Amino acid sequence: SVEPVSFTLNDLPLRDDLRGRSPYGAPQLDVPVVLNTNENPHAPSPRLARALADAVAATALGLNRYPDRDAVRLREGLASYLGHGLTGAHVWAANGSNEVLQQILQAFGGPGRTAMGFEPSYSMHPIISRGTGTGWVSVPRDADFRIDTDTALAAIAEHRPSVVFLTSPNNPTGTALDIADIARVAEAAPGVVVVDEAYAEFRRTGTPSALTLLADHPRLIVSRTMSKAFALAGARVGYLAAHPAVVDALQLVRLPYHLSAVTQTVALTALDHSDELLGAVDDLRAERDAAVAWLREHGFAVADSDANFVLFGEFEDRTEVWQAMLDQQVLIREVGPPGWLRVTVGTPEEMAAFRAALLRATGR
Ligand code: PMP
């Protein structure tokens, strides 16, 4: 090798605000039971894989050309999936909802501006904020992982954030927000309010989506993804619904042709097969409820979950439990408040492996 050995990133002219930071890094380990990144455990059927391959083959004949920069057909397809009277003009799509969130921060955050979140919550919200030079204000959730709306309104009045993140259902706790509380925050916030609904399809019945608030709140943004319920994490497709003016703002910061022709084709084909792709959601919700009940029966503390994962604890040394699970070939996630661990809901077989490993790991 030709490079000097002692050279590290500290020797680079890195931005001061990035020094000492850690990248996002859920371990990607090759073990039989992977329950650590809230993926859908069901792979596409061979029939759907064939449909995707055929669609990509047709697209490949035009790959000398740039893709549709505005992803018009995909946005229309996503709007009709969402319903609520939304059209393609209300929807924007990008490479995963992480990119959607980054574009929101590029347009509405940035140097001299602040984003606010209610933690514990999704770790990428502060990371993307800092990456775009946006200040980060963290407001703590209650002991039961709810957001106290009066605390939220006071923090908004004090910090006047340009962007407020409300994650519902929340990652890593699974907590869904009341629609009335979201409305109060949307009315009080001086900037945009982003409701990150990556796990929306997994909510228990009776908790409405923030999509129902869009018509009355032009600075409200609801972000969604095809990575979770849609079982399409590998394709990298996220999207949002908002007032068309928000979409106009995002066009100012998006890279031209950011969504490849292959990605657009795969996402459109997936939408055509949404019955199959979303077909496991009910089973995953039932498996989630069963996991919550089982964990409680065995004396664990468990956060109520409206998502496809469950946060449970409390452990004196959670790293030890996480490692003991991994030693039994079950990968879960060390995330959230100290003493807690998160498991993604997998297939019935994977959940059986999880339960057996946890009993052994904790000696219960
Ligand atoms: N929001 C939340 C709350 C998430 O948990 C995740 C994925 N872990 C994302 C957004 C991003 O997902 P993607 O970029 O795959 O759409």
Image: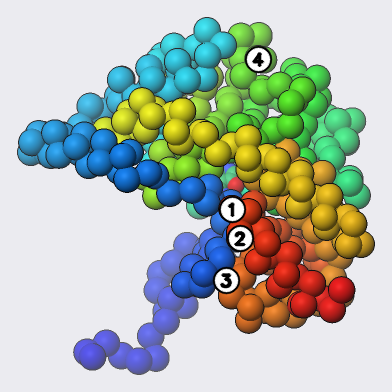
Please name the residue that numbered disc 3 is placed on.
Answer: 20
- Real-space CA distance between mark 3 and mark 1, rounded to the nearest whole angstrom: 38 Å
- Where on the picture, by quarter, is residue 342? bottom right
Closer to the chain start, of discs 4 and 1, is 4
* Residue at disc 3, CB closer than 8 Å to ligand 1: no
User: Residue 29 location in percent, x, y?
Assistant: 49, 72
- Real-space CA distance between mark 3 and mark 2, rounded to the nearest whole angstrom: 37 Å
Q: Secondary structure at mark 1?
A: loop
- Real-space CA distance between mark 3 and mark 4, rounded to the nearest whole angstrom: 41 Å
Please name the residue that numbered disc 1 is placed on.
Answer: 347
Q: Is residue 52 above or below residue 247?
A: below
Please name the residue that numbered disc 2 is placed on.
Answer: 350
Mark 1: amino acid? Thr
Q: Dividing the image into four equal quarters, which quarter contains ligand 1? A: top right
- Real-space CA distance between mark 2 and mark 4, rounded to the nearest whole angstrom: 35 Å
Nearer the camera: disc 3 or disc 4:
4
Residue placed at 50% from the left, 12% from the top? 86
In the depicted view, which residue is nearer to us: 155 or 335? Answer: 335
Residue placed at 66% from the left, 58% from the top? 351
Q: Secondary structure at mark 4?
A: helix
